[in-house]
Amino acid sequence: SVTFTSGGERTSSETGYLTDSVLARPNLTIVTGAHVTKILFTMDVKGKKRASGVEYAGGPGKLRRCLRANKEVIISYVPFHDSLQPSK
């Protein structure tokens, strides 16, 4: 999505949320150009199913990899630059 700063400048989700301090966090992994092939689930201590990681491929024919999370799994299905593409 596209938002505007208090100064009226146009900004994307990428520039609005992925600041230098956020990108420097040691507990954040951002994988670009990947396609999630499976959301991995585990049961929590209360017996509820929760997302615990993802299986992904870097593109067609690429090797699949798994990432596990200790706390949260965040999946973005809209590319960050998508809202900035010209309309057809």
Image (cartoon, grey):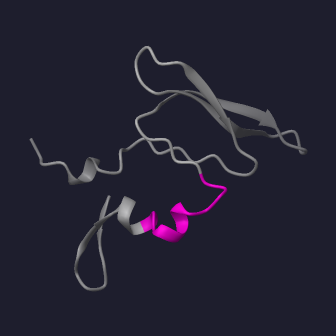
In the displayed structure, would residue 67 be above or below residue 74? above
Residue 54 drawn at (x, y percent): 62, 33
Q: Quadrant of the N terminus?
A: bottom left
Residue 43 found in image quarter: top right
Name the residue rendered at 23%, 77% in the picture: 9
Residue 51 lies, with reference to residue 3, above or below; the image says above
**Residue drawn at x 38%, y 59% as measured from the top left:** 14
Q: Is residue 85 left or right of residue 54?
A: left
Q: Residue furthest top?
A: 61
The image shows residue 88 at horizontal and vertical percentages of 9, 41
Which of the pair 5/45 is nearer the observer? Answer: 5
Give yes or no for residue 73 being in the magenta stretch: no
Direction from residue 67 to residue 83 in the image, left or right = left
Could you say which quadrant of the image residue 64 lies in? top right
Start-end of magenta stretch: 17-28
Q: How many marks?
A: 0
State the residue at coordinates (76%, 48%): 70
Residue 33 x %, y %: 40, 35
**Residue 18 colored magenta?**
yes
Farthest left residue in view: 88
Q: Residue at x 30, y 79 (%)?
A: 5
Looking at the image, residue 63 sits to the left or right of residue 42; the answer is: left
